[in-house]
Amino acid sequence: MEAAAAAGVLDASWTAPTTNTDGTPLTDLDSYRVYYGVATAPCPGPTFFQVPSPTSSPAPDTTVSFRLTGLTTGAQYGVSVSAVDLNGNESACSLVASGVAQAMVSVSPTSTVNFGSVNVGSFADQSFTVQNTRGGTVSGAVSTVAPFGIMSGSPFTLSGAGATQTVTVRFTPITTATATVNMTFTAGAESITRVATGTGTSPLDATPPRVTITSPQGGTPGYSTSSSPTTLAGTASDNVGVTGVTWSNSRGGSGTAAGTTSWTAGDIALQLGSNVLTVTARDAAGNIGTATLTATLTIAFTFTDDPLVAQSTLVQAAHFVELRAAIDSVRTALGLMPFVWTDAPLTPQGTEVNVVHVTELRTALNQAYQAVGRTAPTYTDPTVAAGLTVIKAAHLNELRAAVRALP
């Protein structure tokens, strides 16, 4: 039995044995061992492929072929073959044949491919050619990583020596930076690497993005709410591409929205009164577009016996307790300290309300008006005096209206 190795990765062929060493016909052939190595005498040795025999009794002049894979391209290998019967008995080694391991395919270009300078938001394509260098049918695929991508030509099947496949690779930069990646061409057990590089650049873009607030209330210029924090949502667009959306509040606070072309900005804390919310969209060239919405934060109040009716509704301690709580809520929202009330707490049917309680409500509320820069309310009986002024429904109705008017 003599082995002949053709130059490749690595193709070996030999003539199948037909007799045993004693001359009797071979009827129990199980497999072959294809030994290989860079040494001149690889057989017997630790490195071999186990190749099943298609028949236990080969016919005369039967040729067996096998392709060795996973070898080092360009290295000189020695190859020798032995036969193994069903009982595990192994024949002597064949004569050693040698050959140079080569790749099953070639890839051109063979050097680094530079895609050049490409504007962010645009792209550039380059072509690579994969060629079958060994004959037969070879299948494979090409892979890489962003910002490069395989547009066509992968996976591929090359039938016959010289068959080629064009692979188109696209560079799509998303930042103004140089990117260098490996592209891996895999065929069978072999892989070939090519380096691709490209630089993202800023386009000459003077067009600002367009940003729109669509929520809340359809993005109308202003809205009132008694709830904080609030959430804004909307859209943004640009002739090249939006790179980010941020928000800010005229009363303090700012942040980054989630998303770009469709964005959401949540947990925006509102201050009592008017809050001008500005949303800003930016593109890669530094252009900005803005949209604004005015959100007015109010405090909703519910009062017992609303409105109080003169000469009909009995003024009670509960009415004062409710007004105190409402005014303290307003003061807290404005950053003022809670007021120190006389007879705190007022006890329904236990504490008699008097003029000082009215005076304190007016004082505490006037301080809140002063905090927002507004003129204090006008009251009936501007000066109330103990023992002279009778507490009336009008006094409490005025205070309720003034609380609701803030901010």
Image (cartoon, helix red, strand yellow):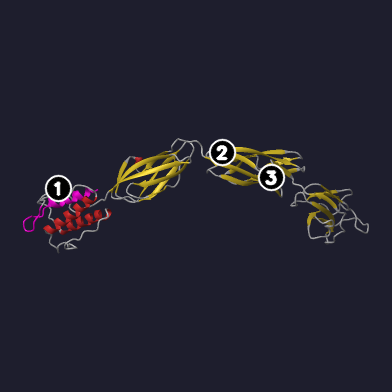
Instruction: Identify the residue at horizontal 14%, vertical 58% (top origin).
Output: 357
Please state which amino acid type lies under the numbered disc 1.
Answer: Thr
Q: Return the x and y of residue 293 as percentages of the image width and height.
A: 34, 42
For mark 3, give the secondary structure.
Answer: strand
Q: Nearer the viewer, residue 403 or 1?
A: 403
- The stretch of residues the image draws in magenta is 383-407
Between the residue at mark 2 and the residue at mark 3, the CA separation in whole angstroms equals: 30 Å
* Disc 1 target residue: 378
For mark 2, give the secondary structure.
Answer: strand
Please state which amino acid type lies under the numbered disc 3.
Answer: Gly
Residue 65 visible in the current orientation: no
Residue 287 visible in the current orientation: yes
Q: Return the x and y of residue 360 as percentages of the image width and height.
A: 16, 57
Q: Return the x and y of residue 323 as percentages of the image width and height.
A: 19, 55
Q: Earlier in the sequence, mark 2 or mark 1?
A: 2
Q: Nearer the viewer, residue 51 or 72?
A: 72
Magenta segment: does it hold 325?
A: no
